[in-house]
């Protein structure tokens, strides 16, 4: 078992962030580094090691050794380790949240929410002994029994995005590890520290050295993971172009791959909806985490006369939002993650205006005293957006909400179904029949009825359709267990004199 490690939030505040291999910080050579920033101040704070193929080789070697032993550890012991980890994260979640706020920029309450949603998956993984049960059929033939079991794959990897540095990895590794695999995480190079904090907590919980590994880096590290013959499966979450690349490259190398991509989530508001609830929801889901959520609402589809009645309510709420550094009490919207991303989102606001959409709320003038170099952009609201505009077609991933007007329910549905992404969608209505029709007809993976961000609980699976997911397995829930295990069916007979004798006929059940 691993030597207990005590971690503190201060460990990750200063100095460099390096890999976690074989149950300890990497002390080998580092040839490339990336910069880390405080998004609220705009300052460079530290740097992160970037792995090349040789570091990935070392990580896979340590993970392979660990996987050989870990798969034989009893279900009870694996569940206990997961439970100990759950307790540690629960106790230390404020520290994890502070790390998230410092590196990602999201406000502390939102960061705590992220950790809590990740914890749900850890709790789900504590029940693995129940979920891994196979099937047994007695006497499939005379004196012959048949049963199915699910076994771990070996070494599996996860490649994750910047926007949920704690939760998205937790969608993967608690289940993979509880199933008996060794897991290699390649977190986003923009906010890698939470992964190292959690690695230390996993070690403290009793996860053996090498069962959980973190390698940092960019495309070079990802390519080394995708090419490595010692890695059996890859879970990816990130933007659509990279998801497609990871899926195609990983499967070509013979790996099992699930690759979750980007999104453009619509919120359809019917004329009979509770418009105060709809306005609260549009603002919360549009601007929460500064619009950097894969389940953020980025398009409100206002049906019939809804726009005239809904927009004043939305604008009133936008004007009350507190844009401030994430650790400041009462802050509701923090900065964007990097200056590069800030510039990209601002360029979309400019494009929207140039293409003829009406910018009815403009957050570009927002100033946060003392944080003038921070990556802050206030909430932006576009009305009269049309499907041919760039701001409708692209995923902006910032605090930019677009209102598209539709004449009827059918027009709204057709708009949603024509979109190339299909991660989440919501309908707001008081008509149960309309809601039921929508949930039946809409071609999207996760549907909310008067719920703007319908992220499934850990015991259901999370995933979109179309270009929001490549592969056929969603994450966590039963699909997660299937993804990280292989099925085996055993047919057994305990020799008995009456079965003896050569028979070349095809075996038949008698
Ligand atoms: P990203 O695609 O830029 O990066 C994701 C991961 O891929 C990172 O670990 C990064 O290092 C790596 N990567 C980046 N470029 C690469 C390349 N060219 N080749 C190989 N690897 C590469 O995504 P991001 O900006 O970190 O995250 C935001 C995106 O993630 C948004 O599109 C968002 O919708 C999506 N996302 C989707 C979900 C979902 O569940 N569908 C959840 C969260 C985020």
Image (cartoon, helix red, strand yellow):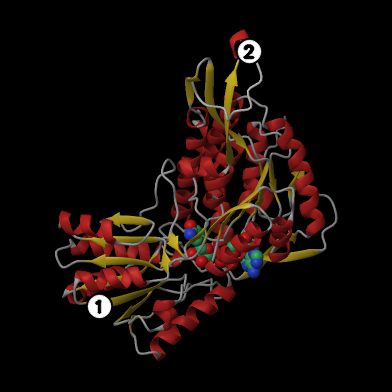
Depth check, front residue: 11 or 350: 350
- Residue 266 percent location from the top left of the image: 34, 67
Instruction: Give the SS element for disc 2.
Output: loop
Residue situated in front as seen by the camera: 498 or 157: 498
Percent across and percent down for residue 72 are 68, 27
**Camera-nearest residue between 46 and 143:** 143
Q: Is residue 76 above or below residue 443?
A: above
Residue at image point 36% right, 62% down: 285
Task: Where is residue 243? Give x, y as percent.
Answer: 56, 63
Q: Position of residue 488 (x, y in %)?
A: 58, 33
Ligand 1 is within 8 Å of the C-beta of the residue at disc 1: no
CB under 8 Å between discs 1 and 2: no
Residue depicted at x 85% and y 52%: 28
Residue sitting at the far right:
29
Residue under the point 16% across and 75% down = 305
Q: Earlier in the sequence, mark 1 or mark 2?
A: 1
In-image side of 148 versus 320 (left or right): right
Which sits in the foreground, 383 or 134? 134
90 shown above or below 148: below
Is residue 240 visible in the rendered image? The answer is yes
**Left or right of residue 257: residue 283:** left
Q: Residues within 10 Å of mark 2 (few under 14, many from 20)?
A: few
Dot in front, 1 or 2: 2
Q: Is residue 47 visible?
A: no
Residue at mark 1: 405
Residue assigned mark 2: 495
* Vertical arrangement, residue 408 with respect to residue 210, above or below: below
């Amino acid at each position: 078992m691993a030597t207990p490690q005590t971690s503190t939030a201060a460990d990750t505040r200063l100095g460099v962030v390096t890999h976690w291999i074989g149950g300890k910080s990497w002390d080998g050579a580092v040839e490339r580094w990336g910069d880390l920033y405080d998004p609220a101040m705009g300052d460079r704070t530290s740097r992160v090691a970037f792995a090349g193929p040789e570091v990935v080789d070392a990580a896979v070697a340590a993970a392979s050794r660990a996987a050989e032993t870990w798969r034989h550890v009893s279900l009870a012991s694996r569940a206990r380790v997961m439970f100990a980890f759950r307790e540690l994260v629960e106790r230390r979640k404020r520290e994890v949240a502070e790390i998230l706020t410092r590196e990602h920029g999201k406000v502390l309450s939102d960061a705590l929410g992220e950790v809590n949603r990740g914890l749900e998956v850890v709790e789900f993984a504590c029940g693995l002994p129940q979920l891994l049960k196979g099937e047994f059929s007695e006497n499939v033939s005379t004196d012959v029994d048949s049963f199915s079991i699910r076994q771990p794959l070996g070494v599996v990897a996860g490649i994750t995005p910047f926007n949920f540095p704690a939760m998205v990895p937790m969608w993967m590794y608690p289940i993979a590890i509880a199933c008996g695999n060794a897991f290699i995480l390649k977190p986003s190079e923009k906010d890698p520290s939470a992964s190292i904090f959690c690695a230390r907590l996993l070690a403290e919980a009793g996860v053996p050295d090498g069962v959980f590994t973190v390698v940092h880096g960019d495309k070079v590290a990802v390519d080394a993971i995708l090419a490595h013959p010692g890695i059996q499966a890859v879970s990816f979450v990130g933007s659509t172009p990279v998801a497609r690349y990871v899926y195609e490259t990983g499967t070509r190398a013979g790996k099992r791959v699930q690759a979750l991509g980007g999104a453009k989530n619509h919120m359809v508001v019917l004329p009979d909806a509770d418009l105060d609830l709809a306005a609260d929801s549009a603002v919360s889901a549009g601007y929460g985490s500064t619009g950097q959520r894969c389940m953020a609402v980025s398009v409100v589809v206002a049906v019939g006369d809804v726009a005239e009645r809904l927009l004043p309510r939305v604008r009133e709420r936008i004007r009350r939002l507190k844009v401030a550094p994430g650790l400041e009490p009462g802050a509701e919207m923090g900065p964007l993650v990097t200056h590069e991303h800030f510039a990209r989102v601002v360029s979309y606001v400019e494009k929207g205006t140039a293409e003829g959409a009406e910018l009815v709320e403009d957050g570009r003038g927002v100033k946060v005293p003392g944080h003038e170099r921070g990556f802050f952009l206030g909430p932006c609201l576009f009305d009269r957006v049309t499907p041919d505009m760039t701001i409708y077609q692209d995923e902006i991933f910032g605090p930019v909400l677009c209102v598209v007007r539709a004449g009827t329910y059918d027009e709204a549905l057709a708009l949603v179904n024509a979109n190339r992404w299909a991660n989440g969608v919501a309908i707001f209505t008081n008509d149960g029949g309309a809601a039921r029709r929508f949930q039946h007809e809409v071609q999207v993976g996760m549907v909310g009825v008067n719920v703007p961000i319908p992220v499934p609980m850990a015991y259901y699976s999370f995933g979109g359709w179309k270009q929001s997911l490549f592969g056929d397995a969603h994450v966590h829930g039963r699909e997660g267990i299937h993804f990280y295990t292989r099925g085996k069916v055993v047919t057994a007979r305990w020799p008995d004199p009456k079965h003896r004798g050569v028979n070349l006929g095809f075996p038949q059940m008698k």
